[in-house]
Image: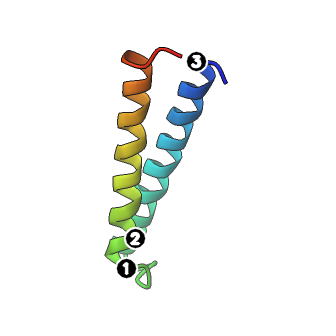
Amino acid sequence: MSQSSLNRRLIQIFGMLLGVSVAIWVLRGFAILTFIPGGIILLLLLGAIAIGLISYAQRTWWRL
């Protein structure tokens, strides 16, 4: 995988994780998805942050 395609894939995964976690958080706030524990939402948000940091590091520091 080239650097740009890997970074594009990481950004897509970041966007999906962030979007899903925010959507679940909002739906849980409206009492629609009350059965999902807060820890799952926290893990999704932490995963999005981690993927975002890896994408940033891959773009700026790592040279493949």
Residues at circles 3 and 1 in contact by the CB criterion of under 8 Å: no
Residue found 53% across the figure and 26% down from its top = 7
Q: Earlier in the sequence, mark 3 or mark 1?
A: 3
Quarter in which the N terminus is drawn = top right
Marker disc for residue 4: 3
Residue 62 location in percent, x, y? 43, 19
Is 21 situated above or below 64? Answer: below
Judged from the image, the secondary structure of the residue bearing numbered disc 1 is loop
Mark 2 belongs to which amino acid?
Ile
Q: What's the CA distance linking mark 2 and mark 1? A: 6 Å
Circle 3 packing at 10 Å, graded few (<14), some (14-19), many (20+), is few
Quarter in which the C terminus is drawn = top right
Q: What's the CA distance linking mark 2 and mark 3? A: 30 Å
Judged from the image, the secondary structure of the residue bearing numbered disc 2 is helix
Residue found 40% across the figure and 48% down from its top = 48
How is the rendered protein coloured?
A: rainbow
Identify the image quadrant of residue 43: bottom left
Identify the image quadrant of residue 9: top right
Residue 23 location in percent, x, y? 45, 59
Q: Earlier in the sequence, mark 2 or mark 3?
A: 3
Residues at circles 2 and 3 in contact by the CB criterion of under 8 Å: no
- Residue annotated with mark 1: 37
- Residue annotated with mark 2: 40
Residue 41 location in percent, x, y? 37, 66
Residue found 36% across the figure and 18% down from its top = 61
